[in-house]
Image (spheres, rainbow, N blue to C red):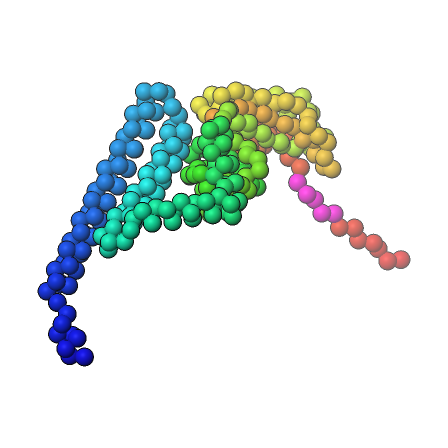
């Protein structure tokens, strides 16, 4: 046993280990440098492209994230190939094995292929872009990333949803045109409807003069429905994207204050107690 240990050329092994270690360190340093330079170049390229070709910011960010992901995948594959080559493994066999794995994925992972195909057409047809408010696969939120395999959406409560693209059967994009602010407010049956409409329209005009986010209206459309205890009047306005909820809140406040100032009743639930006298 001792003769076998003494027969080992420790100098050669140490030298080889040192060379391999230095090569690994060198490859990793080059990898991180190339990745940083590549990501910076991709970012600056899409920033310049969005300025020169009038591409929307959301579209530019979507393509930038997709390109960065593809660039990272290629770099990681090259890194693995170089590391395997350091240990004198046949790189050709690795590449051939990768081709076989890809073929197996093509035949077996139908879900993955469906994700990629669906993601490709979502990007090609510009159905959604980063920072848009959408409804996809039954989930509402702001798009944070659109990839070939998954789409990432952040809900309004902060939850991040990762949706496989094959599950996106339909998409509702709420950010491609002006949005609608809709407010229904009720008045009592005993009140004068025409007077209430005049009061509400005056309040709408004041809100429109103060808020630049309102692009059209607000207009009092008239009586929308007859409730159990109230006459429902509808107000409609068009606003900038993603601003409809704030405008609706301002309109409700203005409506309430205007009706109170003119002594117009806003119905609320009443409870009547009937006491039967005993004979």
Write down the quadrant of residue 186 in the picture: top right
Residue at the spot x=17%, y=49% of the render? 26
Residue at the spot x=27%, y=30% of the render? 44
Front position in the image: 140 or 198: 140
Question: Count the marks: how many?
Answer: 0
Q: From where the camera sits, is residue 150 visible?
A: no
In this view, 212 is above or below 166: above
Image x and y of residue 279, in percent: 89, 57
**Which residue is farthest left?**
11
The secondary structure that dominates the magenta segment is loop
Residue 269 inside the magenta-drawn segment: yes
Image x and y of residue 125, in percent: 49, 27
- Quarter of the image with the N terminus is bottom left
Image x and y of residue 154, in percent: 45, 42
**Which residue is farthest bottom?**
1
Front position in the image: 41 or 131: 41
Front position in the image: 197 or 31: 31
Image x and y of residue 150, in percent: 46, 42
- The range drawn in magenta is 268-272
Residue at the spot x=80%, y=53% of the render? 275
Left or right? Give the position of 246 relative to 31: right
In this view, 131 is above or below 92: above
Q: From where the camera sits, is residue 97 visible?
A: yes
Front position in the image: 85 or 120: 85
Residue at the spot x=23%, y=45% of the render? 31
Residue 120 inside the magenta-drawn segment: no
């Amino acid at each position: 046993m001792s003769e076998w240990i003494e027969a080992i050329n420790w100098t050669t092994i140490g030298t080889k280990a040192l060379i391999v270690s230095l090569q690994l360190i060198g490859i990793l340093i080059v990898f991180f440098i190339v990745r940083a330079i590549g990501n910076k170049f991709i970012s600056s390229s899409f920033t310049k492209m969005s300025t020169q070709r009038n591409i929307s910011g959301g579209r530019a960010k979507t393509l930038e994230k997709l390109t960065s992901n593809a660039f990272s995948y290629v770099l990681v594959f090259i890194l693995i190939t170089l590391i395997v080559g350091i240990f004198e493994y046949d790189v050709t066999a690795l590449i051939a094995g990768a081709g076989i794995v890809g073929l197996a994925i093509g035949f077996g992972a139908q879900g993955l292929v469906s994700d990629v195909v669906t993601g490709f057409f979502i990007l090609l047809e510009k159905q959604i872009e980063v920072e848009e408010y959408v409804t996809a696969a039954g989930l509402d939120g702001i798009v944070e990333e659109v990839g070939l395999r998954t789409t990432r959406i952040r809900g309004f409560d902060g939850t991040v949803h990762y949706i496989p693209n094959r599950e996106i059967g339909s998409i509702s994009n709420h950010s491609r045109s002006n949005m609608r602010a809709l407010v229904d407010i009720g008045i009592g049956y005993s009140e004068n409807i025409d007077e209430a409409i005049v009061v509400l329209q005056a309040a709408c005009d004041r809100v429109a003069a103060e808020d630049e986010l309102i692009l059209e209206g607000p207009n009092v459309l008239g009586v929308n429905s007859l409730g159990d205890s109230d006459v429902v009047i509808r107000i409609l306005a068009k606003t900038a994207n993603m601003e409809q909820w704030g405008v609706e809140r301002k309109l409700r406040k203005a409506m309430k204050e205007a009706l109170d100032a003119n002594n117009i009743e806003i119905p609320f639930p009443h409870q009547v107690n009937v006491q039967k006298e005993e004979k």
